Image (spheres, rainbow, N blue to C red):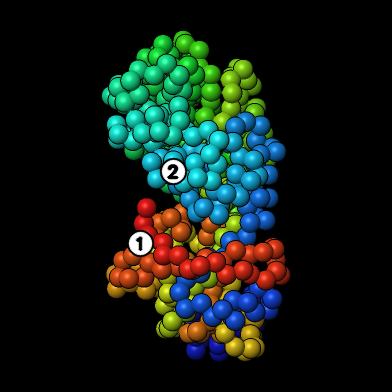
Amino acid sequence: MAKANDILRNPHILTTRPAARTPVTRRDAQIKALAPQKPLYVFDPVRLAQSYRRFATSFGGEIAYAVKCNPHPAVLQLLAEEGIAAFDVASLAEIRAARAAAPQAKLFFMHPVKAPEDIAAAYHDYGVRAFVLDHVDELYKILRATELAQDLELFVRLALPKNGKAALDFSSKFGAQPEEAAVLLEACRPVCRKLGLAFHVGTQNTDIGAYARAVGVAADVIRSANVTVDVLDLGGGFPACYLERTPSLNAIFREIRAAVLTHGLHHMELMAEPGRALVADCMSLIVRVEQRRGDLLYINDGVYGGLFDAGPSLRWRYPVRRISRDKDAETGVTTAFRFAGPTCDSIDMMDGPFMLPDEIKAGDWIEIKQAGAYSQCLRTDFNGFGDAGFLVLDMPGESPVKPVKQRKQTKQ
Ligand SMILES: Cc1ncc(COP(=O)(O)O)c(C=O)c1O
């Protein structure tokens, strides 16, 4: 417990709650033995398999993993081994990555504004048949690039009202307004084999009612279009567990099923494009403390590396844990820390607060948990700090870790 004197001497001590003692595990021992000088991702395949199975058994529709969230070959490979049948891809690079891991999988090219050459290559070279659009110009582009193909599956992306309970709203950049979406559905119907309506409620959506409301908007659009729509694509946005309370996936799926019934859409095929909910908790990022100044820890990764979400735009609070370099005793006092990243840019700051044992010091490592989503794929080489290592955990929990060749991650 922090005493009053401690707090006066050390004003950044925010809580007097005893910190959970940093457990000394075999895994920590492995990390200490490796003594990583660069940021290090630790991948737990068992966790990824569990997340996928949980989603697959309770969702009740087709799952197209959103490759952008974490395109690491080990992730794609494991999902393929688990039997995932589809991927949501946004570029030719993602198409190639998905094809390499799962040659037979169905690919949905879900970027609403695509290069004509990429559409042509996707269709002719990679067997992609499903494309999204939110504007009539994109429809013409798809028809031209595929030479009026007769086997297209077209999805109209619908814009939704702003969702204040998502970490990032996804309807301000892409998506047709409901009236335009209805017109697009009518235009697409005669030129495609299968027709879908897609939306995205915003990433890390914590509003349990958001999908049900979106299904309501979609139902209105389908009614006013007055054409047969085969597929309802619920997009991504399913939340992962960080520090804030989030509704369970099962509760969200129940809401979706109820809304689909209420709005009379139960005859439609259902699909989703989850990213974060599948991969967030399968990776941790191990960073090293390079210097401590009071409550500010200078660490070796940051906003231009794997911690973009923790920076000024999203202010994400990842769960964190100290891995101490020495066998020093911890008093149990937890302190609210901020992080500074390694680059010279002052945007490279993360306010947290990140609750860590007060004894933390230069040379210690921090395990940043839930770093499987939108971390590795966003790394840049700015200031020369792009390198990150990658380890595959053989077994969950206390298991030893198996080193994999260090990879240089660059922005995709
Ligand atoms: C079209 C589309 N689908 C799915 C996703 C995945 O979203 P999430 O990671 O929130 O599940 C995204 C994220 O950007 C997206 O743009």
Comparing labels 2 and 1, the label whose residue is closer to the camera: 2
Comparing 46 with 220, the one in front is 46
Label 1 residue SS: loop
Q: Residue sitting at 63 percent across and 69 percent down?
A: 401
Q: Residue sitting at 68 percent across and 44 percent down?
A: 53
Q: Is residue 376 above or below residue 28?
A: above
| Earlier residue among tags 2 and 1 | 2
Q: Quadrant of residue 178?
A: top left
Q: Is residue 56 visible?
A: yes
Mark 1: which amino acid?
Thr
Comparing 152 with 171, the one in front is 152
- Residues under numbered marks 2 and 1 in contact, where contact means CB atoms less than 8 Å apart: no
Mark 2: which amino acid?
Arg
Q: Residue sitting at 67 percent across and 56 percent down?
A: 46
- Furthest-front residue in this view: 125
* Residue 200 image offset from top left, x and y in percent: 47, 36
Q: CA distance from mark 2 to mark 1?
A: 21 Å
Residue at image mark 1: 380
* Residue 245 image offset from top left, x and y in percent: 60, 53
Q: If the image is split into quadrants, where does the N terminus sit?
A: bottom right
* Residue 300 located left or right of residue 31: left
Label 2 residue SS: helix
Residue at image mark 2: 96
Q: Circle 2: is it few (<14), some (14-19), or many (20+) Cα within 10 Å?
A: some
